[in-house]
Image (cartoon, rainbow, N blue to C red):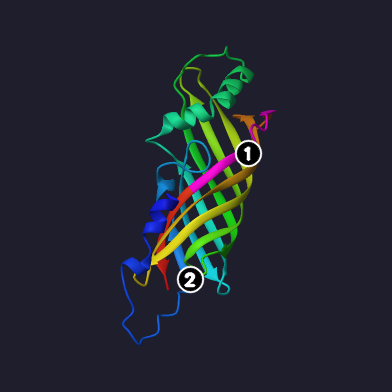
Amino acid sequence: MLAAGLLLSPSLLAQVPAGEAPPAPPRNLLKIAPLGWVHGQLPFSTESRISYEQVLGGRSSLGVSGSYLGTNYPFSFIGSFALSTAISSAITLSGHPAAVWTDAKVRTRGYRYQLQYRYYLTRKRQAPEGLYLGPNVSYAQADYRVSFPDFNTSFLITQKNTNYNLLIGYQTVLGRHLVIDVFTGLDRRDKDTRIYDRNGSHLTTMPKGTKAKISSGLNLGWAF
């Protein structure tokens, strides 16, 4: 993805006439994450995200974002697999025998917030364009309401994630306004997953799982 971003240099699409100074780089960017509509950061979710980036100087910027997490209907099998351990535990704790497979209906609702600082490394361009490196912190919480028609039972899974990332990416502005931003990086995740019965009583807390993972993504937006 980064290689594709490097090929989308605005110098290949537009040139400044001789004798004219290049326009000042934009200082504000609004972006969305289209891949989040396919699958969100948490299991069994879609993510509708809007982010804002403010240029602080020639080499730096600060960004914030907010997301709504909803049910991922088309890719529900991915979520069922990702939550399979929690779902199996909930069935057993509800007094039912462990099942290899049963119909599970999952409804997801949650939110996510992010804060990111970027330092732009490309010497020939000013922020917000070029190769960048920077830390990113995010917090996400989702409630999964799970029901089993075969067992006539239901329960609630809550998951809270705090992520600490170090991201590297490339951002370009095509023309004057169209923003393309691709990134990847290392992620340390603190995850808390708890299961409650239909009456709200706490049943168990799941193991934390693997803390390290790789993050990547694509943002599209408008600069002004």
Residue nearest the observer in this picture, 184 or 100 = 184
Residue nearest the observer in this picture, 180 or 3 = 3
Specify the segment rendered in magenta. Answer: 203-216
Crowding at mark 2 (Cα within 10 Å: few <14, some 14-19, many 20+): few
Instruction: State the count of labels.
Output: 2
The spot of residue 159 in percent (x, y) is 61, 38
| Kind of residue indicated by mark 2 | Lys
Secondary structure type for disc 2? loop
Query: In screen coordinates, is 216 left or right of 199?
Result: left
Residue 47 lies, with reference to residue 104, above or below; the image says below
The spot of residue 132 in percent (x, y) is 54, 60
The spot of residue 99 in percent (x, y) is 52, 14
N-term mark: 1 or 2: 2
- Residue at 44% in and 21% down: 103
Secondary structure type for disc 1? strand
- Residue at 47% in and 16% down: 101
CB atoms of marks 1 and 2 within 8 Å: no
> Mark 2 = which residue?
124
The spot of residue 218 in percent (x, y) is 44, 52
- Residue at 59% in and 33% down: 157
Quadrant position of the C terminus in the picture = bottom left
- The part of the image, by quadrant, that contains residue 222 is bottom left
| Kind of residue indicated by mark 1 | Ala
Residue nearest the observer in this picture, 95 or 172 = 172
> Mark 1 = which residue?
212
Residue 204: mark: none
Residue nearest the observer in this picture, 216 or 30 = 216
